Image (tube, rainbow, N blue to C red):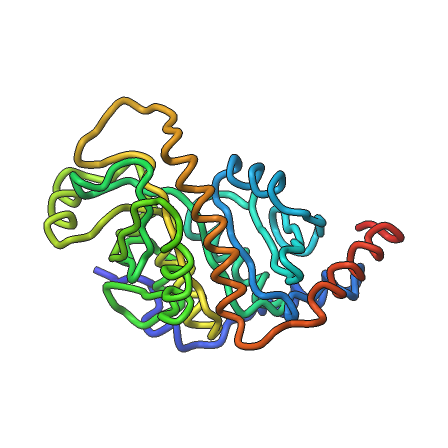
Amino acid sequence: MNGFPLHPGKHALPAVPDPAEHAAYVRTTDPEADLSTFDGVVLLYQGRILEHALRTFRTHPRPGWVRGGLHLVEDQGRGFALCGGFGLGAPAAALVVEQLVALGTQRIITVGTAASLQHDLRPGALVVCTSALRDEGLSHHYLPPGRTASPSPALTRHLTEALAPFDAPVTCGSIWTTDAPYRETTTEVTRYGAEGILAADMEAAAVFAVGHCRTVAVSTVLAIADSLVDRPPRQHSPDTEHALHTALAAAAQALRTSTASPLPSANTRVELLVNRSRRAPL
């Protein structure tokens, strides 16, 4: 029986397509497409948190830069970006991370939801991921065989510190990333829960793998939305919504504090891009 991926050792082989091709293509219509001077990017999986972000921050959309929606943000004299609307799951997240990195970003924090594997981890709690079980397919194309993928320790520390002032329960630990949310079995939930795995998501292992491969800092914070051990009827939780808002605010702060030195040109660059977009929209 063949292992996965089918071609052994492919993580070490050069690929035919290069994300730099995407960046070069974007710059044929917008030469200013560049994220290198911004503090980083916050990836948002759920549409409702993106809508909240667009109401909260002064944003400037940059259509066509990446798959989904990219919005440049001015916040406290600094610049970062929001990205959402690109879909769910490991392939969708990894694709947009590749495109963001090709455009120059060096820091990415993902904000999403997860299902609890622990009885005491309820909707509205936040999980800062310290590692992710690689039970999806994509990470195995980027990394050598292994059970887990890990985020940037430094960016994860900044994220944890940024969450500290908020009135929200935060737990740091490992999660389980799977491609098959409707195939999470009792056997797996029991096993991983007993190992201390906190929650299940669909993207973290993949974005960690891409971050490692491309040598950029990636970190993840997840709001608990439901449970795989105490399975209630599906319902909207205001606590989860509040947790997502908190995670977004902390992610923006973490990007600011993790930047090694001030970016005096960030605000100027945002204004340049805004003015240019008024003259020649994509």
Q: Residue at x 25, y 37 (%)?
A: 122
Q: How many marks?
A: 0
Whether residue 63 is visible here, answered yes or no, is no
Drawn side of residue 97 relative to residue 89, left or right: right
Quadrant of image for the N terminus: bottom left
Question: Which of the 4 image quarters holds residue 144?
Answer: bottom left
Whether residue 235 is visible here, answered yes or no, is yes
Drawn side of residue 274 relative to residue 135, left or right: right
Question: Residue 149 at x, y = what percent?
Answer: 31, 65
Question: Residue 262 at x, y = what percent?
Answer: 61, 73
Question: Residue 172 at x, y = what percent?
Answer: 27, 56
- When the figure is inspected, residue 8 is found, relative to residue 270, above or below; the finding is below
Q: Residue at x 61, y 59 (%)?
A: 80
Closer to the camera, 232 or 86?
A: 232
Q: Residue at x 40, y 29 (%)?
A: 238
Closer to the camera, 192 or 221?
A: 221
Question: Which of the 4 image quarters holds residue 212?
Answer: bottom left
Drawn side of residue 192 relative to residue 94, left or right: left
- When the figure is inspected, residue 1 is found, relative to residue 60, above or below; the finding is below
Question: Residue 270 at x, y = what percent?
Answer: 73, 60
Question: Which of the 4 image quarters holds residue 128?
Answer: bottom left
Drawn side of residue 275 relative to residue 13, left or right: right
Q: Residue at x 26, y 63 (%)?
A: 148
Q: Residue furthest right?
A: 279
- When the figure is inspected, residue 123 is found, relative to residue 60, above or below; the finding is above
